[in-house]
Structure formats: C-alpha cells, structure tokens
Amino acid sequence: MTKKISVLGSTGSIGTQTLDVARMHGIKVTALTANHNIKLLEQQAREFNPKMVAVLDLGFAAQLKIALSDTDIEVYCGEEGILNAATEDSCDTVVNAIVGVAGLLPTLCAIKAGKNIALANKETLVAGGSIVMKEIKSKNVKLYPVDSEHSAIFQCLQGCPENSLKKIILTASGGAFFGKKRKDLENVSVKQALKHPNWSMGKKITIDSATMMNKGLEIIEASWLFGCSDEKIDVLIHRESVIHSMIQLKDNAVIAQLGVPDMRIPIQYALTYPERFFSPTFELNLAEISKLTFYEPDIETFACLPICRKALRNGGLYPTVANAANEAAVELFLHERIKFLDIADIVCEAVNSFSDDRKDFSLEDILSVDKETRIRIREKY
Ligand code: NDP
Ligand code: MG
C-alpha cells in the first residue's frame, strides 16, 4: 500500500492496533507519538522507522532522544512536538488515537496541513465539532471514522442515496454495569468499573462505557459525522457487540454492520477505504453465538446518556462542557477521589449550571471553557 500515516497516540489501545494493521499491509509510518510510554515508543520507532517521534512529557522525550541516538529518527517533545507529528510533510493520513480533548488541536493542525484524518479521538468532535467540520470542508480533506459504531454507520451508508437516511441506531454493550440500578452502583470499585464485557480498551473509555458517557459522546460524534440531530439518533443496548450499529432508511429498511468485536476491522477500513483488504481477525460465527439480544437503555441509572443529549440539543459550548466535566471526573474516579456515581452527577451539574448562548465561538473559546470547567471540578474535589 502506498499510504503514509502518522499515528498520534501510537502506544495506546487504538494506536497499537493501528500499527498491527500497518504491519500487516506494509503501510508506511511517518510519525509516532506518546504521552510518556517511551519504552514502547522506542520499540515501535525501531520497527517502523518513522521520520519522527514525539513525546508530550519533556523529561521522557529527553530520555528517548538518548535511546534513539543511534538512529536518524528525529525526537520532538511537548504539545508542539505532537503538532509536528500531526503535520509531518510526507504523511497523507493522520490516525488520531490520542485520548481526550488533547486530541483536538492536533486534529485541527493536521486538517489545516491538508491531511486526511482517521479519527478514533471522539472528544475532538464532541468538544470542537463545529470548527473541525468547517475546516474539513474548507480544506477539502476526508474524515474517516474509526470508532466502531461510526465506522459501521459509514459502511452501512455506502451506496445509499443522499437524503435517504431516516435515523441512526447506535448499539451499546451497556458496559460493566448493565442491569444495575443506582443503589447497586454506590460503592463499585475502579477495578469493577474497568471490567468491560467485550472490548479491551484504554482506561478512560472503559470507564466511559461503564457510565454510558461513551454512548453520550458517540451520539454527539454521530451528529457531526452524519449531520443528524439528536432525535434522529437512537441508542439500543446490544450485549454481544456483534452488530456495531445500524441505519434506518426512508422506506424503513434497516441496514446493519456485523463482525467480531475487534477494532482492527474499523481501523483498517478507515485506512483502505473504499477498498477491502484481507484481515487476520476472526470470522463471525452466528450459529455459535446463536442469539443476539437488545434492550432499551436505562437513562435513569445512566444519567450521562440523557445529559449528553441535552448538551447536544443546547448546542454551542455545552458539549465542550459535558466532555471536560467527564474527563475531570473520570480522572478523579481513577484516583479514587470520588465515587462512581459522582461522575454522572458532576457531568450533569456542569451542563445544568452552564449558561452561555454563544453560537459563534472560536477555538480559543472552546479551550478556555474546557479549562475553566476542569479547574472548577478539580478545586471542588
Ligand atoms: P489509551 O489510553 O489506550 O491510549 C491513549 C494514547 O494517547 C496513548 O498513546 C497515550 O500515551 C497518548 N496520550 C495520552 N494522553 C495524551 C495527551 N494529553 N497528549 C498526547 N497524547 C496522549 O486510549 P485508547 O486507545 O483506548 O483510546 C484513544 C481514543 O480512541 C479515545 O478518544 C477513545 O475514546 C477512542 N476509541 C477507543 C477505542 C478502543 O477500543 N480503545 C474504541 C473507539 C474509540 P501513553 O501510552 O504514553 O500514555
Ligand atoms: Mg465506540
């Protein structure tokens, strides 16, 4: 394959699986980045021989520079270093697998540099969807979804006439606490919340799955990717994670995308689109699974879901606030400073107490609202 990719967040769950796909299909890797895991980043750099690597943490970057001094690979550091990787000259597609709103600026810089984007970092669209979509249009670059649900919808839409979409049905596994009520969740531990039934992912998204914030973020992500309002996006609990999402068309035909839960399938499609290449993933065996189940989401217990819908309906900077509050709360929960149920309470409080009707805002406005929201929450807990 002649594609050249920069992988931001290459040491994470999506990043390492992206490199599996690159290895399998001989995709050239031009840049790699991490926050602080320089051990793995060094291994990846030696295997893929990119032009550059970047590490957010300055001290770790200095160590990596020494470790890679026998190679020609350039080592950059800090936020600027990550932006260098996002705009590396020879690359045509940037895979953004950074976690959190830290991915927003690299996405925007990559778009401005004319790169196509394979986007796993959903927080980019939740916090900055309006600006990102405007830049995508003005630069005439492509945005390919990596998130499995959005990849599924994108796949289902292939060949559908424009304006034929009636609604999107996002499937959700229900996370670690499906079927539980608020009283059952009062004292759940970090370890319990990190046990996802079907997917092995980074810590932040696994907690987001347990609170169902992940599905709330995905509703907002889908609204930007597919131009749908909140009432055109349904959520359906589907425990087996075999149907990755569905679309319903004007004539009520429903199209679904199925497969084993393995992120290498949507990652690969984002890199090979519109082509289909061989994949080493398992084949789906429906006879063995025998039964697929579906339930309505419990929006009373999992309050992150309806609050994200509210943030989407309010528009403006409300989704930015919901996302920032959630990132701050998840961090506090992972450090055992708050309880599991506090996460949803914090997100709801942040959105409900936010009052700002600006519809026209800049990147600086987004970043400052994001920062203020986090500071307020960190000071309180
Ligand atoms: P991980 O935590 O596994 O990986 C995150 C990556 O980003 C790591 O390389 C990490 O470096 C790096 N990183 C962390 N913080 C920063 C920062 N502030 N600036 C720059 N780099 C940073 O996350 P996942 O791979 O699970 O998720 C990545 C994104 O993809 C998220 O937005 C998630 O919602 C989305 N996603 C993930 C799925 C999955 O299956 N994992 C499925 C669908 C979407 P280091 O290793 O050094 O910490
Ligand atoms: Mg998903």
Image: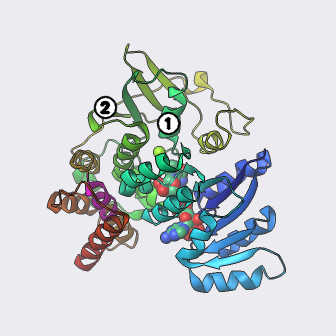
Quadrant in which the N terminus appears: top right
Outermost residue to the front: 138
The residue under label 2 is 232
| Label 1 element class | loop
Label 2 lies in ligand 2 vicinity (Cβ under 8 Å): no
Above or below, 60 against 28 in this view is: below
Amino acid type for the residue under numbered disc 1: Ser
Above or below, 152 against 177 in this view is: above
Q: Give the image location of residue 126, x and y in percent.
A: 37, 53
Q: Determine if the magenta segment contains residue 317.
A: yes
Label the magenta part by its dominant secondary structure. helix
Left or right of 22: which side holds 319? Answer: left
Compare residues 329 and 137 and report the one nearer the observer: 137
Q: Which residues are magenta?
A: 316-325
Q: Give the image location of residue 61, x and y in percent.
A: 64, 81
Q: Quadrant of residue 72?
A: bottom right
Q: How is the image coloured?
A: rainbow
The residue under label 1 is 241
| Label 2 element class | helix
